[in-house]
Image (tube, rainbow, N blue to C red):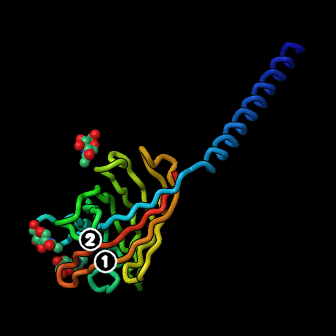
Amino acid sequence: MAAMLISRRSIQLVLVVAAVVAIAGAVHAAAGETTATTTHIKVYWHDVVSGPSPTAVQVARAATTNSSASFFGAVVVIDDPLTSGPDLNASSPVGRAQGTYVSAGKDTVALLMNMNFVFQSGRYNGSTVAIMGRNEVFAAVREMAVVGGTGVFRWARGYAQARTHTFDMKTGDATVEYNLYINH
Ligand SMILES: *[C@@H]1O[C@H](CO)[C@@H](O)[C@H](O)[C@H]1NC(C)=O
Ligand SMILES: *[C@@H]1O[C@H](CO)[C@@H](O)[C@H](O)[C@H]1NC(C)=O
Ligand SMILES: *[C@@H]1O[C@H](CO)[C@@H](O)[C@H](O)[C@H]1NC(C)=O
């Protein structure tokens, strides 16, 4: 009986110690976050839907999508080039935007963006930033959340602002300026 009590006590003690260690770790991690740096990255995102080698392809659509001006229910997979300047052919490549966007607005063209910016040059080469948010494409500025990252951008939190640079009504191709503000 006594032995059982003791062992129960020691189990409780172990649990208490474990909890204290866990809390100390969490406090330490929270303190670490305050030392994070903020990085600003400006890139141009090219959504090429036309031509022989599109980088954005529609993979699904709702039965009602065709009759809706908002394209509600359309799903597009992207592997869009990211460049340092607005000209896709003349600017140096920075990486790719890989993911999906879903037309999620019934009455407005509002996309749910779900993509990774995959950096393939410079000091961020090999690192990624995960972006998820609402993109009401005809608004002047659209803000989306930076929800995470890898490599240089581990523990990333922040936001992205998108501004349309050019939109070709005939082809549907678009170039969008993205400014990322990332704490990591
Ligand atoms: C939507 O329109 C395209 C042509 O514009 C047609 O090929 C397709 O079958 C239509 N889809 C639906 C679900 O009506
Ligand atoms: C970029 O080059 C492609 C062909 O390589 C061409 O079709 C396209 O018009 C060019 N875009 C610009 C903005 O010059
Ligand atoms: C980026 O990193 C990869 C893998 O390490 C390397 O092969 C490639 O040459 C690098 N690209 C640039 C532009 O530095």
One can see residue 74 in this view:
yes
One can see residue 51 in this view:
no
Q: Residue 16's x, y, as percent?
A: 78, 31
Q: Disc 2 marks which residue?
A: 86
Choose the circle earlier in sequence order: 2 or 1.
2
Q: Disc 1 marks which residue?
A: 165
Query: Camera-side residue: 141 or 50?
Result: 141
Q: CA distance from mark 2 to mark 1?
A: 7 Å
Query: Camera-side residue: 113 or 178?
Result: 178
The residue at the point 22 percent across, 64 percent down is: 91
Query: Toward which corner of the image does residue 64 lie, by quadrant?
Result: bottom left
Amino acid of disc 2: Pro
Of the 4 image quadrants, the one containing the N terminus is top right
User: Of helix, strand and loop, which one carries label 1?
Assistant: strand
152 relative to 87 in the view: left or right: right
Q: Residue 142's x, y, as percent?
A: 44, 75
Amino acid of disc 1: His
145 relative to 7 in the view: left or right: left
The residue at the point 72 percent across, 30 percent down is: 18
Query: Camera-side residue: 63 or 168?
Result: 168
Q: Quadrant of ligand 3?
A: top left
Query: Camera-side residue: 91 or 164?
Result: 91
Badge 2 vs badge 1, beta-carbon distance below 8 Å: yes
177 relative to 15 in the view: left or right: left
The residue at the point 49 percent across, 58 percent down is: 182
Image height check: is 54 above or below 183? below
Crowding near the residue tagged with mark 1, few <14, some 14–19, many ≥20 C-alpha atoms within 10 Å = some
